[in-house]
Image: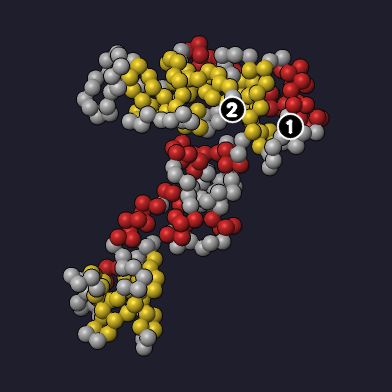
Amino acid sequence: MEIAEIGSGVDSSEGRLRAYHLFYPVANRRFVGFFEGRRLGAGDKLVANIPFGGMSDNDIVDVLDECRCKGNSETQINVIRIATEEDLRLFRENSEKEEDCMRRASRIIESVGVKMNLINAHLMPFSKLIVLFFSSPSRVDFRPLLAPLGKEFKMSINLQQMSFKAEARNSDCYGICGRKLCCRSISNVVDRSCVTLKKVKEQKESLNSAKMQGPCGKFFCCFAFEEEFYKSQKKNFPSKGDRIVTAPNESFRVVDMNFISQIVKAENEEKGVRSFKRDEIMKSGNGEWRIIAGLV
């Protein structure tokens, strides 16, 4: 089967296999799926097979955009069909019942005495299955819950333990910027590479972990978003230790720079530390930095 390329001028005729970024709002997860048929657009609804630990079941996903990537064993899911009006009706009806399911499940968890935080309850639209998402600081033996939950709901029960990062994605928390958490409001943030301590140091942030971590206990997502900015700015700034020549017999050694304020700090043994605006200096042919004529 031929796979269509994005931007190749291929029309939307039947028989083309295309890859799409898909979003599963129930768990706030992003996948890659293939669909053969008409070209899909953002907001289209599909029925796809969603993995839950050691099992899977069909549910509704949203199309984000067309993509070139083929995914991998962790991100690729099997697309069944375009969701019909009947599929969407079942999904809406189940969604209306989920708040009541949360209350009933929470009551049972409290009565049994299992230490876990119930995050979400989801009724699968195409089977008699309820998925209960929970978090806990340690592994949980939830076997004592299966019998009372099964008796209460009279359907199959699947309990999914979520990481603190996944819990933050599914919460309505706000960051220190006053906006909703990136992992909650921006669907593709979960695909960004891990924010490492090296990236944080490159952005010249304080190594005070309390100021760098979100509710999930991981580094802020914004470090990943701002990485390209810092990489591009680094190319246009002198490095630490570079010389800035200000007069025939006078130069300063760069000790620090601020990409946001566009300031370079340099030191001279006799004159101390001096701040230069980035547009006040330029790199000469021999690799030295010089102050632009007329700005001394």
**Quadrant in the picture for residue 151:** top right
Left-right relation of 81 to 104:
left
Label drawn at residue 45: none
Q: Amino acid at mark 1?
A: Asp
Q: Residue at x 42, y 16 (%)?
A: 82
Whether pointer 1 and pointer 2 mark residues with C-beta atoms closer than 8 Å, the reply is: no
Q: How is the image coloured?
A: secondary structure
Label drawn at residue 53: 2
Q: Nearer the viewer, residue 240 or 270?
A: 240
User: x, y percentage for residue 256?
Assistant: 39, 71
Image quadrant for the N terminus? top left
Image quadrant for the C terminus? bottom left
What is the residue that sits farthest to the top in this orientation? Answer: 86
Q: Would residue 122 be visible to someone looking at this image?
A: yes
Q: Vertical placement of 118 versus 199: above or below?
A: above
Question: Callout 1: few (<14), some (14-19), or many (20+) C-alpha neighbours within 10 Å?
Answer: few
User: x, y percentage for residue 288?
Assistant: 24, 73
**Residue, disc 1:** 141
Q: Residue at x 52, y 51 (%)?
A: 219
User: x, y percentage for residue 10?
Assistant: 23, 22
The secondary structure type at the circle numbered 2 is: loop
Q: Residue at x 26, y 80 (%)?
A: 246
